[in-house]
Amino acid sequence: MKKHSNRAELLLAGMVILLGVAMAPAAASAEPRGTAAAQAPQMPVFRFENFTTANGLPNNHVFAVLVDGGRVWAGTEDGLALYENHVWKTYTTADGLAHRAVLSLALDKRTGDLWVGTMGGLSRVSGGRIDSYTQLNSGLSNDVVYGISVEGENVWIATAAGGCRLNLHSGEWSLYNERNTPMLEIWAYGVSATPTKVYYAIWGSGLLEYDQKTGRWDKYEDPDGENEMVLFKDQGLIHEIVTSVSYVDNIVWAATYFGASRYDGRYWHNFLTKDSGLPSNFINQVRGVDATRAWFSTDKGLAYYDGTNWAVYRPSLKDGKPEMTVRDAEGKVTAIAVTTAPAHNYVLGIDFDGDDIWVATAKGLSHGIRQHR
Amino acid sequence: MSVAGVGRPALLAGVLVAIAMWSLGTVHAREQQPSAESLDYASPLEVLISPDGTRLFVLCQGSEEIRVLDGASYAPIKKIAVGRVPRGISLSPDGARLFVANSWDDTLSVIDTKALEVVATWPVGAEPSSVVEDRAGKRLFVANRISSDVAVLDAATGTEEKRLLGGRGASYLALSPDGTRLYATHVYPNPSPYRTAPESEITVIDVGRAVVVDRIPLHGIAGVFHTAFSADGRLGVVAEYHPKNLVTLAHLEHGGAFEYTLMVFGADVGKTVEVPLDELERYASQPFGVAIAPDKSRIYVSSGGSEIVTVIDVPRLLRFIHAHPAPFVEDLAASANYVVTRIGVGMNPRGLALTGDGRRLFVANRLDDTISVIDTRNNEVTATVKLDGPKSVSPLRRGEQTFYTARYSFQGQIGCANCHIDSTFDGLQWNLEPDGFGRNTVDNKLIEGIKGTQPYKWTGTNPNIPTECGPRTEKYFWRSENYDDLTLADLTLYIRSIEPRPNRWKLPGYELTPAQERGKAIFERSVDKFQNPIPEANRCAFCHSGPKGTNQKLFDVGTKKALDNPGLFKSPPLTNIALTAPYLHDGSARTLEEIWTVYNTQDKHGRTNDLTKDELNDLVEYLRAR
C-alpha cells in the first residue's frame, strides 16, 4: 500500500478491519511437525473460557480489553462492558458514554479512572461517573479515538486526526499533527507514553517518538520506503503502516500490518511469519511484557514470544478446533494438545491478570486461565 | 486580604457618602471608595476545638489568620498569619498539627499546635478549600474548588501524589468515623444537559487506596456544603441548596425559588433521603455547617442567609423518614415533625463545632466577627465572643452583610449569595419574570470584577449596579420591602469592590504560554486565514476589548433562540471565563469550545470557521488566561 493512499480508501479499509466482520479463515503460516509435546519449550498453556452475547457480552465484536484488579472491562461495538463478581454490566451512551463503539481502553493506575476511546469521542469513567469529551465540546482532535495511554497527569490520545494530549491539572489540550510533528499521515492508531518517551503508532507514517525532556519529535520509518518488500531487514521499522506500539523497559515493540519490530534504541529486530513464530504479518496490537517478551494480536491468532520461542493460540484455521503450537529457536513447530482456544482467530487486544490473560477478538472475549503443568 | 476579596492595594482610605436617586427608572449611586478600616475584619468562617478542649481555633478569612482562643474563657491567645483567603481547617488525628487551606494562593499552612506557629507552607491545587488527614497520618486530602479535584498529599512532606476527580467546585471534606471513607462535596453543579435539573454528588473516596469508589447522586441539587456523621457512622447529613431554576422565578410567595435541605444517608435510613429544613415563613436560607451530637440525639445546621442554627431531633427525624417513604422535600409542613428549634445567632453563620461532650456548640458568624456559644441543653446562646477587629461597621461591611442576608426577601427566603455563592456564581440558568414567563432564560454570570462593565443583564437593560441590584432585584426577586437608599448604596459599594480571584491559567509574571500567544494573535487578528479582512465588529478583540474583555455594547452573535425577545446581547466580560461554564446568554454552550463548534455556524460570533482545531484550541487557551 502506498504511503499516501487515498484517505477514503484507507478509512474504509480500516473500518472493515476494525469491525472484524466476516473474517475468512486463511492458510496456516506454520505446520506442526508432530514432535512430542514434551520436547517442546515450556510455553504458557491456558484454558480459555469465552464470553459472547450468549453469556453476557453486549456485542461479540470486542475491540479492547483491560484488567483492573478483580474487574475486567471490555470495549465492544455496542457499549463498554464490565465483568465483576461473575456478572456483566454494560455502560452505554445513556450512561454518558461518548459512543456505543468502544475502540480503546486505558487505566490511570494512580486514580483508578478508566479512559475509554470510542468512535464518537473520549470518555472518563471515575467512580461510576462518566464524563465525555468530543471534538465539539473539548479540544479533542477527533472523535475517533484509537488509542490512549495515561502518564502522570497527562492523557495521551491517538485519534483519526493525529495525536492529542490532555493535561489533567491545567485542562489544556495539545494537538500533534502534520503541522507540528514529522507526521505525514495523521491517522494515529496507538500510543504508549512513559515519563521519558512517548511513542505514537501512525497508520502510514511510521513511528513517532516524543522526548518528554526536550520536547522534540523524532520519526522512525521503513528504510524500504513505500515498498512492501523487505529489502533491508533489521535496518529499521518493518513497515510504515504501524498499528500499535508498546514501550516497556526502554524497548519499543511496534506492530504493523506487515510484520513487527523491536527497537532497543540502537538496533532493530524485525519479525515476519517467514522467519519467526508470528502466525501472520497482519498485527492489530502488540503488548510488550518486558524487554524480551511480548504478545501479538494478529488476524490469525494470538502469539506469544518469550525472547526465543513462540507460542500461538487460536481455533485451527483448517477446522476451527482448539490449537496451540510452539516454535523453538530452530524453527521447529510442535503442536500442544489443548481443548480450548480463544473465541476467534481475529484478535484485537490482550491484557494480563496475573498469570491469566484476557483476549479481545472479533467474535467474543476470552479469559485464558493459566494451566501449570 | 480584606473581607470578601477586596485586595489591599485597591483599598484607599475614604469616607462613604452614598446617595441613591431615582431618575426615569434608573438608580444612581455615587462612586465611593471603601474604607481602609475593612482590612481588619476577622470574618470567622470555621471553628475547631482541640481534642482536649483547651483551645479554640478560629479560621478568620478576612484577616487571613488563625485566631487561637482559650477553650473555656474564650480569651484570645494568639493570632497566626496564614495564606491568602483561607477557607478550610482541620486538625491531625493526634491534634498536634493544624492544617489550613489557603484558597487564593493555593497553599496549605501547617501549624504546630503546641508552638502555635506555621511550620510549613506547601503548594497544592487550584483554590484549596478544605483539608483532612487520614487516621494513619500518612496522607492529606485537599479539596480544590477550581480544579474540581481532591489532591492526595504525603502528610510528612506535602508532596502531591495524585488528584482524584471530584464534583465541580470540590470544596468540603469529611472523614467517616471509622476513618475508612472520605466524603467530598462541591459547590457548583456538575455539567448536565441544557435546561435539566442540576446534578450534584457526594464523592466517596476509599482512604486506604486513595481512589474514588462511589458517587452518591444528589438530583436537583446545586450548592453542597459540609457533611457530618454520627459517632456510630450510621447516619450522615449534608447541607445543600435545592434551586428551582427550571420554572420562572416569580413564585417566591409559593416557595418557588429555593429549598434548603439536608441529604440524609447511611445505614439508619438505608438510602439517600432529602429532608427540608424550611417551614412556611421560616426558611433556612444558605445552609452551610452541620454537626451531629455525640449521642446522636441532635443535628445542628447553620444557615448563613437566615442567621440561625436549626436544631433537629434525630429520633423524630428517623421516625418521620421511615413513616414517609415517598419524597417529601416539597412539604413545608414536614420540618415541624423534627425541627426542635431555630436559634438566632450572628450575621452569616457558617462553621460549627461541638465540644467532645456535646454540651457546647460554637458558631462562626462570618459577617459580624463573633463566635456564638450555644448551650445544647437548653438551645440558648450563652455567650457571644467578639473577635478583635474594627470597632465600627464600615459601609463596605454593611454592603457585604446585605449581600449575604436573606432578610430582605419575602419570608426571608433568598439573598444575593444564593445565586452568587461566595460572591461568585452558581452555574445555573434562570428564567426571570420581567422578560415574560418562559422567555429569555439567562445564564448566571460571575460578578467578580464587574465594576465598570455596565450595562448589566444580558440584554443590557440595566444601566448600572444600583438599578440591577435595587428596584429590579427588589421587585422581581425579593418581592418584599425595598432597600433604603443607604443600604442600596452599601450593597453597590460591596459589589463594585469584588475583585477577581487570581487567574490560575496565567503564568507568573503574566507571560503567555506558546499556545496562549498563538491564541492571542487569533483574538486580535484583522484578516482571516484567506487574507480576507474581518469586519471590525466581527473581530474578537472589538467586542471583547479592554482589560475586562468587554466593550460594554450589545451585539447579535447569531445565538438568538425562539424564546429570546431580542437578538442583541451584551458582550460579557472575560474575567476568569474558564471558571464559569456554561456559556452564551442562555448557557446553551456547555464549554468554551461549543461557542464556536456548535453555535457559530454563521460566523457571527467572530470569524472562526476558518480555524483549524489546533487554532481553536489556542484561542481557548488564551481566553482561559484572561
Image (cartoon, rainbow, N blue to C red):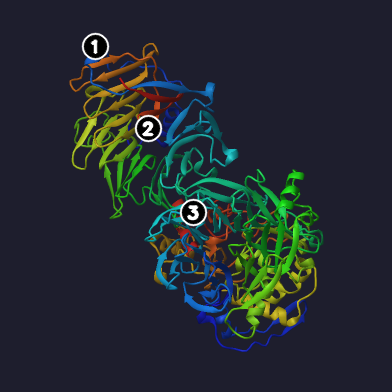
Density class for disc 2 (Cα within 10 Å; few <14, some 14-19, many ≥20) is: some
Q: Nearer the viewer, residue A365 or A160?
A: A365
Amino acid found under the numbered disc labelled 1: Ala
Chain for numbered disc 3: B
Q: Position of residue B537 (x, y in %)?
A: 57, 66
Residue A123, horizontal then vertical, whole percent: 50, 43
Q: Is B297 placed left or right of B128 in the picture?
A: right
> Residue B610: which numbered mark, if any?
3
Alpha carbon of mark 3 to alpha carbon of mark 2: how far? 46 Å
Graded by Cα atoms within 10 Å as few (under 14), some (14 to 19) or many (20 or more), the crowding at tag 3 reads few
Q: CA distance from mark 1 to mark 2?
A: 29 Å
Q: Residues within 10 Å of mark 1 (few under 14, many from 20)?
A: few
Chain to which mark 2 belongs: A
Q: Quadrant of the C terminus of chain A?
A: top left
Give me the C-alpha separation between circle 1 and circle 3.
68 Å
Which SS class for mark 2?
strand
Determine which quarter of the picture holds residue A226: top left
Q: Mark 1 against mark 3, which lies toward the viewer?
A: 1
Give the residue number, with chain letter if any, for mark 2.
A352
| Amino acid type of the residue tagged 3 in the rendering | Asp
Residue on which the image places disc 1: A36
Q: Which residue occupies 28% across, 14% down?
A: A335
* Residue occupying image coordinates x 59% and y 65%: B355
Left or right: residue B55 compared with residue A154: right
- In the rendered structure, the answer to whether residue A80 lies left or right of residue B410 reads left
Give the answer, above or below, for where B264 lies relative to B111. above
Label 2 amino acid? Phe
| Residue B464 visible in the snapshot | no
Based on the displayed image, in which of its 4 quarters is residue A250 positioned?
Answer: top left
